[in-house]
Amino acid sequence: MRKAAENLHIASSAVNRQVLALEDELGVQLFERLPRGIRLTAAGEILLSYVRRWEGEAQRLHHQLDELQYGAGGTVRLAATEAVVDMLLPPVFARIRARMPRIAFDLETGASPWVLDQIQANEADVGIAFNPPALRGVRVIGSLRYRIGAVMTPDHPLASASALTLDQCAPFPVIFPSDRWLAGSVLRNVFAPRADSMNVVVRTTNSSAIRSLARTGLGIAFLSSMEVAYEVERNLLKCVPLVEPGIPIGRLKLLVPSQGHASSFAAFATECLRQELFERDEEGAVA
């Protein structure tokens, strides 16, 4: 008590009163009063561990505020599905760099399962994946709802339709998802049984290849509206909603590791990405 009073520059009796008041507020005894001093009770040890944790959090807060105020920089590690690179990421990168010009991005792309692996292993600060399952070590902080469409050139006979089914697409050549792609997709139960009845020209897992093939007019592809937003805006492709029974509304999810502490610039970049998802969400809100 005396040492605490000396460090605080107050009387030891004042420290004792504060301790007694805290014990009264918490309803537990924090110290055992012994003939030759005091020692922490179990409740006191628990409180001490929380106080030390609070001190650590306060130090991190001040450090991150200093980073923002004085323009500290760093690298944000981003793992994303290839489909989001064209439309989603460029405006977000520009917005972030305008506010924090010393931020750099380490962008790696891959399939959604790979993105999840990167987040679980803490190899990425933030990830973007289609319809990821709930996994330990991964926290979802935002999502964008999207629909699957039949994708074709603007001069295709079906391009003027307001909606299409797989039966309506069946007479035409199609670019079909491969078995490996369907194995991890929410669309497996819809597309897999139809593979033999469709006029399949190419089967692939690569989103970029599918878009390129569709632009040549080789066939109808089946992709999310997000994946072809760049081409649709430039009238290179049309995306007609697919109204096949059993097709759920998909979700593009923003992921971060559930353990550890993000730097201020990684947290800022993540919030910018979350806001971009909110603005693009087809249902008008991000879950």
Image (cartoon, rainbow, N blue to C red):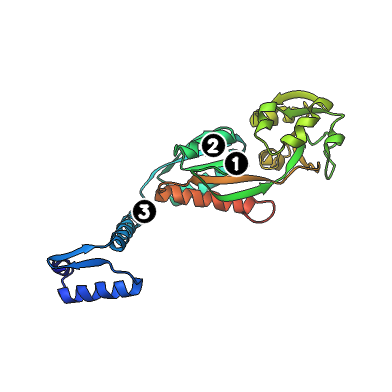
Q: Which is nearer the eye, 182 or 23?
A: 23
Q: Amino acid at mark 3?
A: Gln
Residue in the picture at 48% in, 39% down: 120
Mark 2 or mark 1, earlier in chain: 2
Q: In this picture, is 58 found above or below 30?
A: above
Of discs 3 and 1, which sits in the foreground? 1
Q: Quadrant of the C terminus?
A: bottom right
As helix, strand or loop, the secondary structure at mark 2 comes to helix
As helix, strand or loop, the secondary structure at mark 3 comes to helix
Can you see residue 217? no
Q: How far is the residue under mark 3 from the one under mark 2?
A: 26 Å
Q: How far is the residue under mark 2 from the one under mark 1?
A: 9 Å
Q: Are marks 3 and 2 in contact (CB under 8 Å)?
A: no
Measured as percent of width and height from the top left, residue 247 is found at: 75, 42
Can you see residue 177? yes
Mark 3 or mark 1, earlier in chain: 3
Measured as percent of width and height from the top left, residue 33 is found at: 19, 68
As helix, strand or loop, the secondary structure at mark 1 comes to loop
Residue in the picture at 71% in, 46% down: 249
Measured as percent of width and height from the top left, residue 110 is found at: 56, 32
Residue in the picture at 16% in, 70% down: 5
Q: Which is nearer the eye, 265 or 257?
A: 257
Q: How far is the residue under mark 3 from the one under mark 1?
A: 30 Å
Q: Dot 3, how many residues are within 10 Å of its Cα: few (below 14), some (14-19), or many (20+)? A: some
Q: Are marks 2 and 1 in contact (CB under 8 Å)?
A: yes
Q: Which residue is mark 1?
A: 132
Q: Amino acid at mark 2?
A: Val
Q: Which is nearer the eye, 148 or 159?
A: 148
Q: Which residue is mark 3?
A: 64
**Left or right for 61, reference 97:** left
Q: Which residue is mark 2?
A: 115
